Image: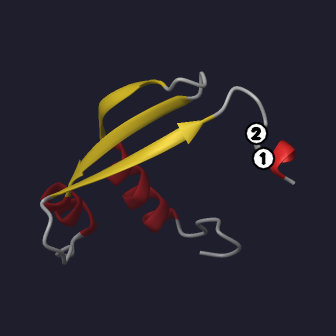
Amino acid sequence: MENYILTSDIVKSKVLATMYLAEVSEYGWDSEGDAFVKMILNVKEVGAIIGLDVVGQEEIIEVEGQGAQMDDFEQAR
């Protein structure tokens, strides 16, 4: 990785393959009209693709992302 950009084709392929395993578990809009998405990832499937055991207590990893229709951060400055 260089400047947050994957430079190895092998690593890039494994990261993309892992991301394809992620499943959307929920999505929608909050009261302010901003979008959110929740995704889950099976840790054992990730380990099988990257060829390493992923250490941790959870079998499933859940992440949430948010997106605004307009630039909210400009107002906070």
Res. 68 in view: yes
Give the answer, above or below, for where 38 lies relative to 34.
below
Q: Counting other residues with Cα less than 10 Å from the Cα at mark 1, is it few (<14), some (14-19), or many (20 or more)? A: few
Task: Label 2: state its secondary structure.
Answer: loop
- The amino acid type, in three-letter code, at marker 2 is Asp
Q: Which residue is mark 2?
A: 72
For the C terminus, the image quarter is bottom right
Locate residue 48, reporting x and y percent. 16, 62
Res. 21 in view: no
Give the answer, above or below, for where 34 lies relative to 63.
above
Q: Is residue 26 left or right of residue 51?
A: right
The foreground one among 58 and 29 is 29
Locate residue 26, reporting x and y percent. 32, 29
Residue 72 falls in image quadrant:
top right
Task: Label 1: state its secondary structure.
Answer: helix
Which residue appears at 42% of the width and 51% of the height?
A: 16
Locate residue 31, reporting x and y percent. 53, 23
Q: Which residue is mark 1?
A: 73
Do residues under tags 1 and 2 come within 8 Å of each other at their CB atoms? yes
Residue 21 falls in image quadrant:
top left
- The amino acid type, in three-letter code, at marker 1 is Phe
Locate residue 41, reporting x and y percent. 25, 50
Kindly report the distance in space between the C-alpha atoms of the residues bearing marks 1 and 2.
Answer: 4 Å
Which residue appears at 20% of the width and 66% of the height?
A: 47
The foreground one among 40 and 64 is 64
The foreground one among 52 and 65 is 65
